[in-house]
Image (cartoon, helix red, strand yellow):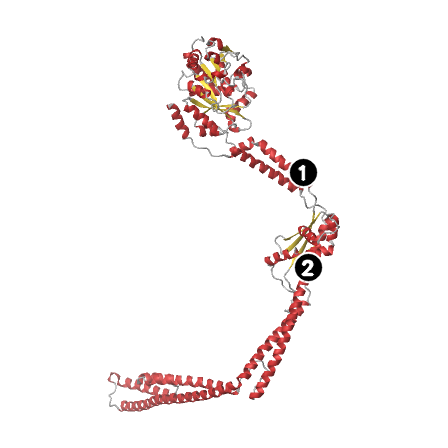
Amino acid sequence: MEANKTDEKVFTATPETKLHFLDYWRIIRIRKTVILAVFLLVALTTTVVTFLLPESYSSMVKISIEQDMTDVDTKNAGGYIVRPTADPFFIQTEFQRIQSKPVLYRVITNLNLCEQWGRKYKVPGGRLSNDKAFEILQSSIRVEQSHNTTLVEIHGYSDNKDEASTLANKVAEVYAEVRTESRAKLTKGGLEALRRQLANKEAAVSNQQQVVNELRVKYAIADYEAAANQPTPSLDQETLRQINQGLREAMHNFTSASNLYSKLKGLSRPDLKKTAPLAVPDSGLVELISQENGLEAKLANLTAAGALDIEHPEVKQIAETLRVIRKQLDEKLTGLVIAMGIRMETERANMDNYLAQLEEAKKNDSQNFAKTRPYYEAKERLGVLKYQYEKLALSIDVTETEFNTPTKGTVQVIEEAEASQVPSSPNKKAYIGTGIGIGLLIGILLAFFIEYLDTSVKTIDDVERALQAPVLGVIPQNVGMLIEEGPDSPHAEAYRVLRTNVLFSRKDPKLNTLTVVSGGAGEGKSTTIFNLATVFAQNGQRVLVVDSDLRRPSLHKHLRVSNALGLTNYLMKQNALEEVIQTTSQPNMDFLASGRLPSSSLGILSSMQMKELIRDVKRRYDFVFFDSPPIMGVSDASILASEVDMVLQVIQYRRYPQPMTIRAKQMIEKVGGNLLGIVLNNINVSQDENYYYYSGYYYDYYNKGEYKGEYTSKENKSADKAAAKEAKLEIKSKF
């Protein structure tokens, strides 16, 4: 038990394997029958339906749709009009208009479709209703935008090729007519409304003109531009304008003189001498300043370095002349400042005069404006009415010109529909190809769905991950009894591998009794126990096979021996052991049948006599093999699992769900059975490549004729000899 716990820890640490592409390929190969069945069903159904569908013809008319505009530009000297880029919302709106009742009902009337389709569909009375004909026509056309263009395609469909082209062309023609009529109707209504407004405006202008004339005469207004739309300025207004202009000039002059006087008045003599010529240009002032500067320079040169004395006559003369010049210059500068003050006062007086005139003019203008105000307001109103009248008249003129201008460019037929010689529907190649693809896809999806629902054992990884137990053998499909096939049977190699793994898995050479159990019936435990015993016997070891499946014994049928005497007779002490053991055609192998099981002897395997039997045969034979019923069905298998030395659990490939196999293993461990490992049975090696390297190699080896009597590899053969030598240490005589 401690060894088993150690093994469980090891297997618990085994990492989970991830799905690989080959796992998906394995599912496809295993479920290929489902895939092919669904594929053929869908493909054949699609093919039959495609050929049964009625043929339909399609014709297409291509048109250009523009917004409502004239063919020539009526606003720019009759030049060719540049049409704006198509609006996608406008195009979608026109799609709906093409399929609307005003268009399709006119098509029905023009083509007399009610009577034609009434005869075609054999309607009672021979005539369809307009609503029914509209439904048929609407389903017989399709409108779409041409790829990467602003063109529109109208497709017509019918089982008659001529009718398909006629429908498409007539829909385009009627649509163009409806667009033209709709535009004309709207334009006429608009013109009538504009003319009514123009008449009202004309009457309003006439009435307002009469009011203006009466007011002009009443107030004796001298309006020299009375015919103009806007009021003309009066004499008072002109005088006021001139006074304002003079006032602005006077204010400017006063400001300039005041600023100049303020600056010159506060300057010292040297600064004033420098600034005055720049502020007030005066040639005399400039001459005096020049003479003063010259005399000062000359006097400085004569008295410099003591050349001449101050009392020298020449120096005195120059000094006197300089005094006179300075006096004249001072008088000139003083007079200049005084003159600037007088100028400032003069400009102030001029400005005050203009201000007084302005106040007087404003007073007069205000009085005149109050008197003539009704006239000028009436004249302004007259100007507004005349402007509105002229704009309205111009709008009517432009609208009438556009209305009388052709608009054929609004809807143009680019390419007329022609009768097609080839049906457009059904597209047999596309339909059948789609059916094949969908059938294959559904088949694969169904296969994966079935695989998802299938919780049975599929791979060795599934077993070892779920049961935490090693797989000791993999048995292929269609394995018979090796005693009938002989030692050269290709199936024997799988059991030889199992025998080798069993010998290496047992912890003690004294362990020589073994049973094979399964969770459910039909998993192959009887075949497995019998063929495993045969392989042991073929290896030269003395073997006893005990058919302990008392309720459904089957081994005696394979050996073709009687089941009259057997295990039950011995356990009920009716016969001795030597009387119930039978020999077989296989050397070194004896057989103990189950015997008849009276209904009163249920539970006989749990008797002391059974335990005595196991101890006895352990001494007599090298290995003893006990067949058993399913462990989930009756208690006999649990009893055997607890009594024998070793237990193998057989799991049939893809038969029972994993929870059932897990429960079977738990029952073995619960009763204290020594579970060596798992045997996977009934593997289809040709379909599942995951098991090829366990069993498929031996088939190839045999089929190529390379196997000539050697039925184990060197490694297995040496292992078998070692195990046999080890086992013979405990062999006793048969009786």
Mark 1: amino acid: Val
Closer-to-camera residue (364/422)? 364
Q: Residue furthest front?
A: 600
Q: CA distance from mark 2 to mark 1?
A: 43 Å
Q: Where does the image place residue 270, in percent across and percent down from the top left?
A: 31, 84
Secondary element type, mark 1: helix
- Residue, x 28% and y 85% (percent of image)? 300
Q: Where does the image place residue 132, in percent across and percent down from the top left?
A: 69, 52
Within-10-Å neighbours for mark 1: few <14, some 14–19, many 20+: few
Query: In front of the other: label 2 or label 1?
Result: 1
- Does 17 sit left or right of 299 as displayed? right
Q: Quadrant of the N terminus?
A: top left
Residue beneath disc 1: 48
Q: Earlier in the sequence, mark 2 or mark 1?
A: 1
Q: Which mark is residue 545?
A: none
Residue beneath disc 2: 176
Closer-to-camera residue (673/681)? 673
Q: Is residue 133 above or below residue 703?
A: below
